[in-house]
Image (spheres, grey):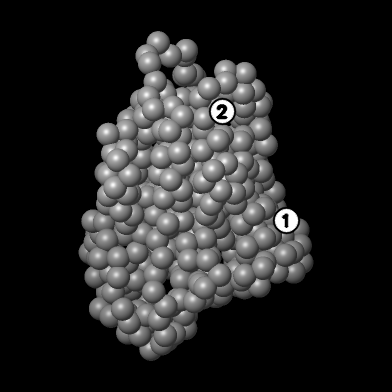
Amino acid sequence: MFGWEFPPEISGGLGVATLGLCKALAHDADVKMIIPKNVPNFNIENIELVGLNSIDPEDIEVLFGTEPTPKIPILPSSFKQPIGPYSSVLPSEFLDQTYYEYYNAAIQPFEIEELYGGDVIAKVIEFEKIAVAYCLKDDFDIIHAHDWLTFLPAMHLKMITGKPLVIHIHSTEFDRTGVESNNWVFELERRAMEMADCIIPVSNYTGDICVQYYGADPHKIRTVHNGIVPVSTKVDAKKRKGNLVVYFGRVTQQKGPDYFVEAAKKVLEYLPDTKFVMAGAGDLLETMILKTASYGIGDRFYFTNFLNKDKLDELLLAADLYCMPSKSEPFGLSALEAAQFGIPVIISNTSGVAEVLPGAMKVAFDDVDKLAAYMVASLNFTGLRQAVVAADNSSLNQITWEKCAKEVMQVYESLFNETNNIC
């Protein structure tokens, strides 16, 4: 299995979901998890965790002491640009020669400080080179890759070994850039879907995107919704005056932070004691800070930047309402995390989590008036809050990583049962 971010080195839901699946899957399968950066002494029971940054230089030389392995004519790019897991990239020409130049560069130990900083393209290709060589020394049955950052080594291994390839789609370039997607990330995702024996999207919403915009074979699609780690703490009745509304996630165009701010402005006309928290980092953070100031509501907003899990739990314990107005959200683990604390959630219609939280309040991502109305109603009417929380609690009981792992195991088994290796 290939992953890019993995706790405690995480940037968002991708790392959390990868860990949750791995821990549950390890009860039924031998999992070797290959990641770019491993933290020393960070061990998980039943999982062999391999960080390429921890491989000694001597071992690198041993790995490449044999004949070079075949190369994949894919992932061309000649520009250097910081790329986040959910950020967009500029269109570029598909120049395969550039990929070969990256790939055929001198082998060196894999060194990485920031997963998404600097030249991510070079990191992705270097990860492919060493990961493929490392994996070829072992025997295995299934290749499983999480999102585009790890598709290259997975595809390469399939070309060499012929083993079944499963790609897990947590987010797509379409989610980040929309219908105008036309860059090497989109093309890499498309080719991976074409080569994969099975495609696991985290929602039916994402599965439909794979078919409609990437031309994926619908017979390869097997939706597996994410799980959640249960929490025992719930929000008690508040003794303080006022209301606290929370947004947490990346502050990027995809997540709709501008709609949150627009709705907050309207809410404050009716409930002036309300406070808002935007917890997260992203390229629109400064823009959102300036926007609240221009509206004269800056004193009602708190911008926390990225919060670790402990700090996020503290925030949710104090929250009265959670909002996720994403333009395109493949799943939305943050909504589940909020719902677990017994607070009502408002989510966009264009989110995968709506499929597993049918009781949540849903709005079109750009319907600011309705979003604001739902906020006011949720904060004003106890009966509505209780009804939404009760419905969400009923759904949460069915959302587990064990259920997720069981469905992934069924995907694996189907690949061995089908003569044509289509799940």
Give the CA distance from mark 2 to mark 1. 47 Å
Q: Is residue 316 visible?
A: no
Identify the residue shown where x is 32% and y is 38%: 297
Q: For residue 28, what is the image quadrant?
A: top right
Question: Label 1 sits on what residue type?
Answer: Ser
Would residue 212 appear left or right of 100 to someone viewing this image?
right
Picture quarter with the C terminus:
bottom right
Q: Are marks 2 and 1 in contact (CB under 8 Å)?
A: no
SS for tag 2? Answer: helix
Categorize mark 1 by other alpha carbons within 10 Å: few (<14), some (14-19), many (20+): some
Q: Position of residue 17 (x, y in %)?
A: 49, 45
Q: Position of residue 207 (x, y in %)?
A: 65, 58
Disc number lying in front (2 or 1): 2
Would residue 261 appear left or right of 362 to someone viewing this image?
left
For residue 36, which numbered disc appears in the image?
none
Identify the residue shown where x is 66% and y is 27%: 391
- Pick whichever, 325 or 354, lies toward us: 325
Would residue 372 appear left or right of 61 to someone viewing this image?
right
Categorize mark 2 by other alpha carbons within 10 Å: few (<14), some (14-19), many (20+): some
Q: Position of residue 175 (x, y in %)?
A: 52, 60
- Pick whichever, 187 or 199, lies toward us: 187
Q: Residue furthest front?
A: 269
Identify the residue shown where x is 36% and y is 40%: 278
- Pick whichever, 3 or 372, lies toward us: 372
Q: For residue 418, what is the image quadrant?
A: bottom right
Identify the residue shown where x is 37% and y is 34%: 276
- Pick whichever, 47 or 251, lies toward us: 251
For residue 414, which numbered disc appears in the image?
1
For residue 377, which numbered disc appears in the image?
2
SS for tag 1? Answer: helix
